[in-house]
Image: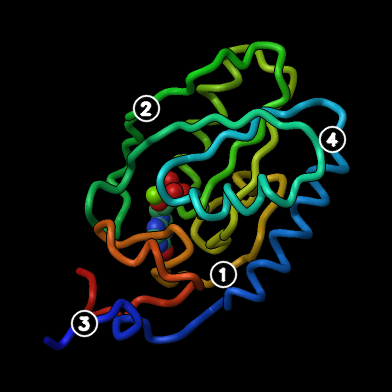
Amino acid sequence: MLIRTPEQDISRVLFTEKTIAARVEQLGAELTEKLGGKRPVLVCVLKGASFFYIDLCRSMNCNIDMDFIAVSSYGAGAKSTGVVRLIKDLDNNITGRHVVIVEDIIDSGLTMQYLKQLFSARNPASVTTISFLDKTARHDPSLKTDYCGFEIPDEFVVGYGLDYANYYRNLPYIGILKPECYK
Ligand code: IMP
Ligand code: MG
């Protein structure tokens, strides 16, 4: 039987596994430097940030708490619906805690803005934002995160947790999806 592999749908690899690993190590060291003594709560925004989140947590050389939240602004498509929906809230109280929101990608910036507002209302000690990727041309500069893995052009990318209709998350690198593979 002929198996259609996810690789066939990628037009170009943007970041290899090796490049990603090196950058995540750097980010982990920077976060450790900033929040190391404060036992930060690292919040994973499911599911896109999952691979980045796990690697980032592993690269931090300090005590941390792990928590998970699920939101959706995309449904199954490649364009944002403009409405953020909370699907799964945090398990733990973040009042008085140093919170780090870990996202996969900033596109319109709406999801991160929503999460920042949601968490700030719970009176944390601080909120730090980090995104693996950032499509800087797609949003106002004021919506930039505190930390970012890579700035990328306005292309639809998949892999390392990022999906199209739940496909391609398990690709170990970041690749540009062929336009004929999404509508
Ligand atoms: P925003 O709210 O418009 O910033 O969109 C953020 C969310 O959209 C991310 O958490 C991703 O799940 C999704 N997203 C935006 N651009 C892409 C992309 O190029 N590939 C895969 N998912 C994307
Ligand atoms: Mg997503």
Q: Residues within 10 Å of mark 4 (few under 14, many from 20)?
A: some
> Ligand 1 quadrant?
bottom left
Gap between marks 4 and 3 measured at Cα: 44 Å
Q: Name which residue type carries label 4.
A: Gly
- Residue 124 relative to residue 86: left or right: right
Gap between marks 4 and 1 measured at Cα: 29 Å
Q: Which residue is mark 1?
A: 152
Residue name at image x 70 percent, y 18 percent: 97
Quadrant the C terminus occupies? bottom left
Quadrant the N terminus occupies? bottom left
Gap between marks 2 and 3 measured at Cα: 33 Å
Q: Residues within 10 Å of mark 2 (few under 14, many from 20)?
A: few
Q: Which residue is mark 3?
A: 4
Gap between marks 2 and 4 measured at Cα: 27 Å
Query: Does the closest atom of ligand 1 sit within 8 Å of the Cβ of label 4?
Result: no
Task: Measuring from the top left, give residue 108's x and y in whole percent.
Answer: 46, 50
Q: Which residue is mark 4?
A: 36
Q: Nearer the viewer, residue 149 or 51?
A: 51
Task: Measuring from the top left, give residue 40's x and y in whole percent.
Answer: 73, 29
Q: Nearer the viewer, residue 127 or 37?
A: 37
Q: Earlier in the sequence, mark 2 or mark 3?
A: 3
- Residue 31 relative to residue 14: left or right: right
